[in-house]
Image (spheres, rainbow, N blue to C red):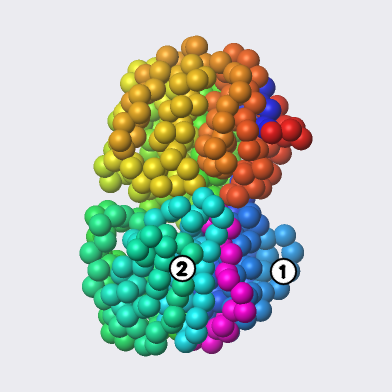
Amino acid sequence: MLEVRPCSRLEGTASVPGDKSVSHRAAIVGALAQGETTVHGFLESEDCLATLHCLSQLGVSIERLGPGAYNICGRGGLGFEEPSDVLDCGNSGTTMRLLAGLLASQPFFSVLTGDASLRTRPMARVIRPLESMGARICGRQSNTKAPLAILGTSPLRGISYMSPTASAQVKSAILLAGLAAEGKVSIQEPALSRNHTELMLEHLGVPVVTKGSRITMEGGVVPKGSTIQVPGDISSAAFPMVAAAIIPNSDVVLQNVGVNPTRRGIIEVLLAMGADMTVSPMDQAGEPRASIHIRGSSLRGIRVEGPIIPTLIDELPAIAVAAAYAQGTTVIKDAGELRVKECDRIAAMTQELSRLGVDIIEKPDGWVIQGHGGAGIKGGRANGFGDHRVIMALAVLGLGASSPLSIGGAGATEISFPGFTHLFGRLGASMEVSCSD
């Protein structure tokens, strides 16, 4: 149980953990590379550690050099070993979908599985394009759900794929499979999704061309080992950003936050809502990074829809909380992807925010939230649905509530944000995990 007490002010400087998306990709692309890759700032969360564990089962030598620092000895494309057991991805959809791309070309049999939540999440979106490249993949419910049994095929063939959704995981799976394909690999998205895989492949010597929302790569190129610096995760930073914006008189600086253009949506939305925020770019080696200074301010309702949605899909629970403390109506739409995350985040946030005094209406692809400047928001007891982002969003809501809030499933925050309560404690918040749930 996560116990949250109302807070009058947040103040201080902090660094959020490493970017989850970049950490996954650093490990996987490093494993595919020729030679050694050293990763700094790796997020040691349950999801990312699941990726490392799966890679080690595939014969990848991984040495921990210190907190967040790893040396990965790449297997050079097709040099992986057949695992002796199933590969357990835990709760991580990124691990499963990206490893499906890697394993599609390996000359052996493997099985990807995960926890009960992951086994309900859609996998056809990855399986279909990989099958078009020649991969052989079988899954539950007519090849739509995990466990996934993969019999590798080599070589795969190039593909020109029109993706129905802007999904970085689908795009990444195709690109990773394309490293062992003959011919050109091209993906057209309806909107450009986060581009961490493209940037990392280029950093490790694989040319990738992006024109608008079309990404093209020549198949059959092996990455070269290098050094990768993982920035702080903007999806994690979203929670203290929103908290500082909604709590009066707050003054918070978040250092070394990744501000990749395909991930900046939370910044653009908070600025549009009237947040008092300054973004100061840092050294731009690899992924762009910045220091973010945010102060308490009066927010206003806005519309959040269209092409910006893929740039902030994981931050929408936090944005819903910002909307609850704003003045006026916030409309969030085109976010149906939230229905197939660790839980149905649209339904979960509607149920719990309504219970805690927020004027919120559920829509098929988002919410309509009538903000009253935080008036009427109360504490009590909330269900986190075992979803790390729902739990953390509710915790931020509780900082401005009229009474303490207890949230079930506190341990799930370790999936993406180790030290969540510690960071907020350093900023002056009162959050603690109790032993009962």
- Residue 196 falls left or right of residue 301: right
Looking at the figure, which quarter contains the N terminus?
A: top right
At label 2, the amino acid type is Leu
Looking at the figure, which quarter contains the C terminus?
A: top right
Disc number for residue 148: 2
Q: Residue at x 31, y 68 (%)?
A: 128
At label 1, the amino acid type is Arg
Q: Farthest residue toward the right?
A: 435
Q: Nearer the viewer, residue 157 or 35?
A: 157
The quadrant in which residue 368 appears is top left
Mark 2 surroundings: few (<14), some (14-19) or many (≥20) residues within 10 A: many
How many numbered callouts? 2
Q: Residue at x 51, y 68 (%)?
A: 112
Q: Residue at x 63, y 38 (%)?
A: 409
- Residue 101 falls left or right of residue 302: right
Whether residue 126 is visible, yes or no, is no
Whether residue 359 is visible, yes or no, is yes
Magenta residues?
A: 74-92
Q: Residue at x 65, y 26 (%)?
A: 406
Dot 1 lies on which element? strand
Q: Nearer the viewer, residue 85 or 194?
A: 85
Where does the image place residue 206, in percent across and percent down from the top left?
A: 41, 78
What's the distance in space between the residues labelled 1 and 2, CA to CA?
29 Å
Disc number for residue 352: none
Main SS of the magenta part reads: loop
Disc 1: which residue: 64
Where does the image place residue 315, in percent across and percent down from the top left?
A: 45, 41
The quadrant in which residue 190 appears is bottom left
The verdict on residue 235 being magenta is no
From what the image shows, is residue 128 above or below residue 371? below
From what the image shows, is residue 294 above or below residue 204? above
Mark 1 surroundings: few (<14), some (14-19) or many (≥20) residues within 10 A: few
